[in-house]
Image (cartoon, rainbow, N blue to C red):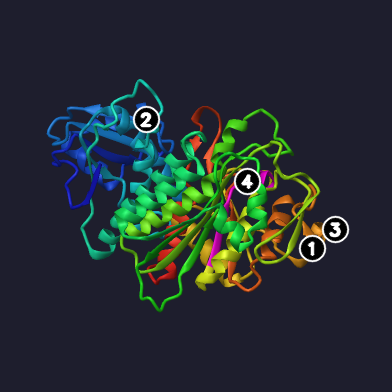
């Protein structure tokens, strides 16, 4: 699918479909009024059949004197309440209708609608992301595939082109590619998407985009002393991998950002076995790893002026005769000892060694991304990603980037008071702190390994995938990571 920015007249555009907005008060946008006038009131006559709710649609065909084959009316919601969510709902509704329509090209006359003071570049980025999400399909494992090539091949954003908008379009398309990669990696079953598979995907990205890739094997981890990481993988037949992927888009003298992604390709809970219900969704426990690969693919694809190193510890967490047991004590790469009271709190164990390893790259800031705690889902649901940080400026940057990408976060406390819950009688500390404040004590555990760094932790347990009928990976927080890296490099 190709996107382009060029000026068009809605009433004369020779397109398979022209998409026009209508507010709930039956008020047409400026572009829609022009088409209504040209068609001698055909749109006004059809308005009783459109609810006007944001995202609702009504298709009209062969309007008199109108250049487009079809006109798609899209509800924008109440005019006095029109804001970011309504705009996104409208574009998403239009994209879903276009997907089912079969038109080969469309002009999206929604992108010039003013959205709460946002610049048009924001409209462009959100429109491209919503259309690409609507057209994403994962059918790689099905024997009977639908036509994999969507009918919609061209989407025009009817705006006067300028450097800022063209840059926004390039960013949006690259981000969509990275998000789709993260979605696909998440949706693949764990018997396909193994630690070795993730390592091969990293090497593939390195070849395609001229990145630097390194994969550490079990013997390398043993030599380094990654006792926590190795403890998690002991019962699995799949060899663990520590993936390092570097993108260099800025001067060599510029310190990199470090993205550290949790890559548990399947999480049974180990000896602290999870209940059977919905355990299949534990294939998504590598979503942090997928988001790092997706973000690096996006940044490299747009040749972003930033240096980023991705560090991905990846393995399975399985039960078995060799599995780590509750009460076992391990020595981490940092030299600190951990009493493992619950083997299902394994993400923090592989991350702590990876965070220590990432220090060798002397990053300007370190962000780890992980489906870490069910407690974060209870706290924030499936809307906001949990944000924890030991540096308020870094937290502000991530919050601003999340708002800009509309891949939002909510900051949680990381006070020293919570460290008491991790107290152990037999080791330096334990890997869990009990039920109270579970997402915070998990972050507090990681904080013990990042005291020398500007560090933030994103808990994506509630936002990385959807359950139910529409089960599937969301690709979050790739848009957030990309926006953060770009803003950090000065591209606001």
Q: Residue 322: horizontal and vertical position, in percent? A: 70, 41
Q: Position of residue 45 (x, y in %)?
A: 28, 29
Alpha-carbon neighbours of circle 1 within 10 Å: few (<14), some, or many (≥20)?
A: some
Q: Is residue 11 shown left or right of residue 401?
A: left
- Disc 4 on helix, strand or loop? loop
Which callout, 4 or 2, points at the residue further toward the start of the chain?
A: 2
Q: Residue furthest right?
A: 425
Q: How many marks?
A: 4
Answer whether labels 3 and 1 touch (C-beta < 8 Å): no
Mark 4 lies on residue:
233
Taking depth in this image into account, of 119 and 127 the one nearest to the observer is 127
Residue named by callout 3: 426
Between circles 2 and 1, the one closer to the viewer is 1
Quadrant for the N terminus in the image: top left
Q: Residue at x 26, y 32 (%)?
A: 149
Q: Is residue 186 visible?
A: yes
Vertical position of residue 350 compared to residue 428: above or below: above
- Which numbered disc flags the more N-terminal residue, 4 or 3? 4
Return the disc, 3 or 2, that comes first in the chain's sequence. Answer: 2
Q: CA distance from mark 4 to mark 1?
A: 22 Å
Instruction: Give the CA distance from mark 3 to mark 1.
Output: 7 Å
Residue name at image x 13 percent, y 39 percent: 14
Q: Which residue is mark 2?
A: 50
| 50 versus 474 height, above or below | above
Q: Taking 435 as reference, is 149 above or below it? A: above
Secondary structure, mark 2, is loop
**Viewer-side label of 4, 2:** 4
Instruction: Name the residue located 57 percent from the left edge and 34 percent from the top edge.
Output: 281
Q: What range is drawn magenta here?
A: 366-377
Residue carrying label 1:
428
């Amino acid at each position: 699918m190709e996107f382009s920015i060029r000026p068009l007249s809605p009433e004369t555009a020779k397109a398979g479909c022209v998409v026009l907005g209508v507010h709930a008060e039956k008020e047409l946008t400026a572009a829609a009024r022009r088409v209504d006038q040209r068609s001698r009131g055909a749109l006004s006559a059809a308005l009783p059949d459109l609810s006007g709710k944001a995202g609702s649609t009504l298709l009209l065909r062969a309007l008199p004197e109108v250049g487009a084959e079809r006109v798609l009316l899209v509800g924008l919601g109440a005019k006095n309440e029109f804001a970011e969510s309504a705009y996104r709902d409208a574009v998403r509704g239009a994209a879903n209708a276009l997907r089912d329509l079969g038109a080969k090209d469309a002009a999206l006359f929604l992108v010039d609608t003013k959205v709460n003071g946002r610049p048009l570049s924001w409209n462009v980025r959100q429109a491209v992301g919503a259309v690409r999400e609507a057209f994403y399909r994962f059918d790689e494992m099905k024997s009977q595939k639908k036509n994999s090539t969507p009918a919609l091949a061209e989407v025009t954003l009817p705006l006067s082109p300028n450097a800022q908008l063209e840059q926004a379009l390039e960013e949006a398309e690259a981000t969509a590619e990275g998000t789709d990669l993260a979605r696909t990696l998440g949706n693949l079953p764990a018997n396909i998407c193994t630690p070795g598979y993730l390592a091969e995907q990293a090497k593939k990205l390195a070849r395609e985009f001229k990145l630097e890739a390194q994969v550490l094997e079990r013997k390398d981890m043993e030599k380094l002393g990654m006792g926590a990481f190795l403890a998690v993988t002991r019962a699995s037949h799949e060899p663990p991998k520590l993936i390092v992927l570097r993108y260099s888009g800025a001067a060599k003298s510029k310190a990199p950002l470090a993205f550290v992604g949790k890559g548990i390709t399947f999480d049974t809970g180990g000896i602290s076995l999870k209940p059977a219900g919905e355990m299949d969704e534990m294939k998504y426990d590598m979503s942090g790893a997928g988001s790092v690969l997706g973000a690096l693919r996006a940044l490299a694809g747009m040749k972003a002026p930033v240096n980023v190193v991705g560090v991905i510890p990846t393995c399975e967490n399985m039960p078995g005769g060799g599995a780590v047991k509750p009460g076992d004590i391990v020595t981490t790469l940092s030299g600190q000892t951990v009493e493992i009271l619950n083997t299902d709190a394994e993400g923090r164990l592989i991350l702590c060694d990876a965070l220590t390893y990432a220090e060798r790259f002397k990053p300007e800031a370190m962000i780890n991304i992980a489906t870490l705690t069910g407690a974060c889902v209870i706290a924030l649901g499936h809307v906001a990603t949990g944000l924890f940080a030991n540096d308020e400026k870094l937290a502000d940057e991530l919050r601003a980037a999340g708002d800009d990408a509309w891949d939002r976060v909510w900051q949680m406390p990381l006070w020293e008071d919570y460290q008491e819950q991790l107290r152990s009688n037999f080791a330096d500390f334990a890997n869990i702190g009990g039920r109270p404040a579970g997402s915070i004590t998990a972050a507090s555990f990681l904080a013990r390994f990042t005291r020398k760094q500007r560090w933030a932790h994103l808990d994506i347990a509630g936002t990385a995938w959807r359950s139910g009928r529409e089960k599937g990976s969301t690709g979050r927080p790739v848009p957030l990571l990309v926006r953060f890296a770009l803003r950090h490099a000065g591209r606001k």
